Amino acid sequence: MKRGNKKPELSAEIFIIPLEENRYLVYAPLRKAAFAGNAATVNFLADLKEGIYRGESDPDGTIAEFLRRLEIVDAGAETPPSEMCGGTPEPLGVSLFLTTDCNLRCTYCYASAGDTVRERMPLAVATRGIDFVIRNAVRKKAEQIELNYHGGGEPTVHWTVLTRSMEYARRQAEAQELKVNASTATNGMLNDRQIDWITANMQGATLSFDGLPEAQDKHRIRPSGRGSSSRVIHTLHRFDEAGFSYGIRMTATADLIPYMADSVDYIFSSFGASSVQVEPAYQIGRYADRPSAETEEFLAAFREAQRRAKAHGREITYSGARLGTLTCHFCAMSQDSFALLPDGTVSSCFEACSHSNPYAHIFFYGEQDDGTEGYRFDMKRLNSLRRQAVQFRRHCSGCFAKWTCAGDCYHKAVTVMGGEKEFAGTGRCHINRELTKDQILEQIREAGGLCWHELPERLTMNNEQLIINN
């Protein structure tokens, strides 16, 4: 039997996404493959999915051969992402939530930082966490530990413990021939002494900044009500002068969406940030009762901002659309993330950073063990967090973005649902799918317009019109 007449067998999980009349996007996420096809091609695939092969639909085997070279047929079984943690956690990195205090009063702060009871981490809590991950690294024969400063406030406000814990980590790690990869999240309200120290001692930072000064000053305000743009712009210029590696995290409230594209233009014209991540404001904390930014207007503005970024030879990102990543975990929350609150409580989530969080009981899974130098872990709670991987969500099973979005942020889902309930989607789901679809189509365009497949060989086909046109 000729290969063109051989009955092909579907070997990929495929999704059919309507584009326009008689034109569809066929996407096989685990093969990193996609193409735009007509109704006849989609019907051919639908038959294969049911185990039916109609030879008259593909008399010379052209369609089957095309699908074969994309590994959509006759390529053996796929291996979905399924990495899961097990047993007692042995993290190689620690995030220190140094304080709930803050020198800004951003109107959309998820933690209402500065308005809650002020908590500050004692140095002993920080060093205990550092010692714990160093012991794990030695036992696992790792080369380095990760040290991150984050939390429901501005880490640099607790400057003494930040610098002393960093210096302690370096000394202890060097004694074990380990490296320390240190980074911080910051609002950029830094003085020159702090900037000099950070650029000399850390490997990177994520700086919250909303772009145009008028956008920054509208929501990222000081306790006095004054804007923060001048100080943050100074920090950005100093980071650039030092050649320091940093990314920018931009938040889009409903009223800031019209500023988005111009703000991206401004950032890439003025600063050397390695990346800009744009996210709609979360309706929690101070923004709980404000208008949603998870809208069609956000999508349109993001697309325009992406075009502006490309004109600068750069790109912007959004956390729910990341085509280059295949994973079952949105973030480290379901992978034993080890973050310490000021009192030594262990949290799995950067947004669950205070006992005042109404869903703290869902994300907190450990505490200091006074009988040892380590921690006691609630394994029932931890295993529940581990099972927030996307393969366990029925709602996500039919979504083409599931292996890249990976179920999106669990903390946001819990907030929307009002607790631990079966996931039924959020307003971000539509944004995640639309921006993922954009990325797939862009990959097809960049690959020549016929198809996309991450394989070394470049596909060349006859009868291309059969596949991509009406």
Image (tube, helix red, strand yellow):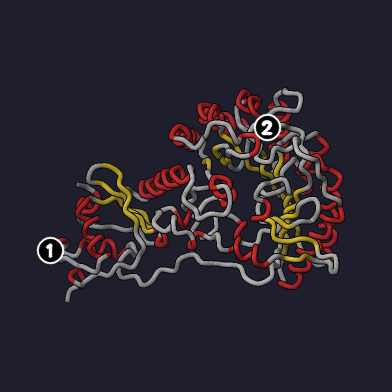
Q: x, y percentage for residue 298?
A: 48, 34
Q: Residue at x 34, y 56 (%)?
A: 15
Disc 1: which residue: 56
Q: Residue at x 57, y 41 (%)?
A: 277
For residue 54, above or below residue 148: below
Q: Is disc 2 placed on a helix, strand or loop? A: loop
Residue positioned 26% across, 51% down in the render: 37
Can residue 99 be seen here? yes
The percent coordinates of residue 135 (x first, y second) are: 78, 68
Toward the viewer: 80 or 333?
Answer: 333
Tell me residue 400's x, y (percent).
40, 54
Lower position in the chain sequence, tag 2 or tag 1? 1
* 333 in relation to 219, above or below: below
Task: Pick the residue in front: 397 or 116.
Answer: 116
Residue picked out by circle 2: 106
Pointer 1 local density, CA inside 10 Å: few below 14, some 14–19, many at least 20: few
Q: Nearer the viewer, residue 364 or 206?
A: 364
At mark 1, the secondary structure is helix
Q: How many marks?
A: 2
**Relative side of 197 to 91, left or right:** right
Question: Label 1 is placed on what type of residue?
Answer: Glu
